[in-house]
Image (cartoon, rainbow, N blue to C red):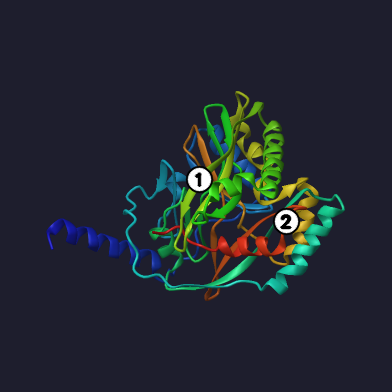
Amino acid sequence: MNHSVFVFKTFCNFAHQLCNCKMTQPFPYKILNKQQTIGQINFLAGSHTAFLFIIDYKATDGFVIKQDKLDANFIQFRFHSHQYPKNETPNHKPETIRWDIFPISLKEYQPKFEYVVNQIQKGNSFLTNLTQPTKVQTNLTLFDLYYRSFAKYKLWLHNRYTVLSPESFVKIEGRKITSFPMKGTIDATIPSAEQIILNDPKEIAEHATIVDLIRNDLSLVAEQVEVKRYRYIDKLTTNTKDLLQVSSEISGLLPENFHQRLGEIIFALLPAGSISGAPKQKTLEIIEQAEGYKRDFYTGICGYFDGENLDSAVMIRFIEQQDEHLIFKSGGGITAQSIMEKEYNELIQKVYVPVC
């Protein structure tokens, strides 16, 4: 073994041991309530200071962490061109992965699904995102999952959760704000999978509803809102199979002074439409009644502001540490055209990690 290979492997082993060791220090970041989170985001963005932010599903709690306060022992992330720490080692091929899942049964899922469909038939919702937790048994830790995975957005919080999200929430470049709602998933190995997902009436209706909701949300904070791309396909590689997912791109123009009001702008868009439904407020009540568990930070958002521009993600593909167990939270959109078995299978299909 040459010297450079030895040094690289030694560094990888050290990084892995560092982030998986039993930390004696308490988690150093204080959770903030809604008003504190908004105020801190406004203050830091207004002074063009770089920071990471994490906000829960109900948009009631969050973390706002200045760049110079980040500690790699407790938190690491990679969002496109932004990552911490800067010297993250390259992803590498994992050894054989054990990945056993224990999802809710179809019998347990049925009353939840039927409640949602009944609410839709009553006209209380057009689209409801129904999710459930799944216990996972694996030989990987939260940090292993972070370190070995490929995803558009990766986030790891020590002893809390790992996010491996393919879905952008909003990006801000200059005054331009763009959202990328994702709705529609299919196994890429199915013959003619792309044509099937793009021509499925239920998927068409679901995606149209979300695009309309996001367009209306952006109109609350921006002008000149328009759909730039409609229902384009992304391919995702996972530990079990390849998937196709359908997204759209919607953009608008923020006011000149948006930095001073960035906190209000972000919270005006929450919870994200793609993981709640429409109309949003009534649908949130339906979700609360149907799901029977706490999403907590799952389907919240995380993002990074570099002093000028912002990039953020919806926190899906979410694995949480609960005592000695790992819990993977997943789900999908329910419409009047939904078929229970198909929706149940989609919930299970999404319990994956994007490794190759």
Q: Is residue 201 visible?
A: yes
Residue 121 vs residue 125, the one in the foreground: 121
Residue linked to disc 1: 234
Looking at the rendered structure, the kind of residue marked 2 is Ser
> Residue 287, relative to residue 247: is it above or below?
below
Could you tell me how many numbered marks the image carries?
Answer: 2
Residue located beneath label 2 in the image: 338
Residue 152 in picture, x, y percent from top left: 47, 48
- Mark in front: 1 vs 2: 2
The residue drawn where x is 46% and y is 63% is 240
Q: Three-letter amino acid code at disc 1?
A: Asp
User: Which quadrant holds the C terminus?
Assistant: bottom left
At a point 40% along the width and 70% down the height, the residue shown is 97
Tell me the quadrant of the picture where the N terminus can be found: bottom left
Is residue 272 visible from the viewing direction of this image? no
Residue 210 is situated, as x and y percent measured from the top left of the image, at 68, 43
Q: Determine crowd level at label 2: few under 14, some 14-19, many 20+ residues with C-alpha closer than 10 A.
A: some
Residue 330 spot, x, y in % from top left: 61, 61
Q: Residue at x 41, y 59 (%)?
A: 355
Relative height, residue 196 to residue 178 (above, below): below
- For image coordinates 45% across by 59% down, the residue present is 74
